[in-house]
Image: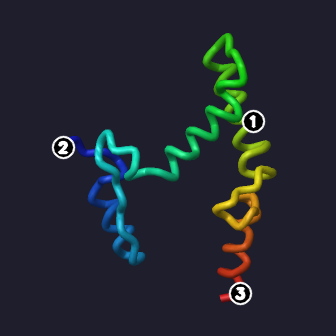
Amino acid sequence: MDTVQYAAHGYRRRLAEHGMLCSMSRKGNCWDNAPMESFYATLKGELVEQRDYLTRDEARADVFQYLEGFYNRRRLHSALGYLTPEQKAATFQTAASAA
């Protein structure tokens, strides 16, 4: 098995120090990483398949704008209680500050 950054010993040790487990999917098994597969389906359906890009740089800029300008800041997510990712992150920060 090839060693990859997210599977490195130091990374796994740091996770263990914080009581976390490393979760790595098996090659070719989309069910191991269903949230990311769902995200990519959303990205393709809401953005990429709706446009024709002339260059790779144009596509990168459009995806960046979609993620930072819409997906994380304005798009409501049912899995987050119909909050945006930005709003959900703020609730975690508020809870951490209160603890």
Q: Residue 88 appears at what percent x and percent y?
A: 71, 66
Whichever of labels 2 and 1 marks the residue nearer the N terminus, that label is 2
Residue 15 position, x and y percent, is 38, 68
Residue at 73% across / 78% down in the picture? 94
Residue 65 badge: 1
Nearer to us in this view, 75 or 1:
75
Tag 2 residue: 1
Can you say which quadrant of the picture contains the N terminus? top left
Looking at the rendered structure, the secondary structure element under dot 2 is loop
Label located before the other in sequence (2 or 3): 2
Q: Which of pointers 3 and 1 lies earlier in the amino acid sequence? A: 1
Q: How is the image coloured?
A: rainbow
Q: CA distance from mark 3 to mark 1?
A: 33 Å
User: Residue 48's quadrant in the figure?
Assistant: top right
At 73% across and 37% down in the image, what residue appears? 66
Residue type indicated by callout 3: Ala
The image position of residue 20, as x and y in percent, is: 40, 72
In the image, taking residue 58 as reference, residue 14 lies left or right, namely left
* Residue indicated by mark 3: 98
Kind of element beneath mark 3: helix
Q: Residue at x 69, y 20 (%)?
A: 58
**On screen, residue 92 above or below 66:** below
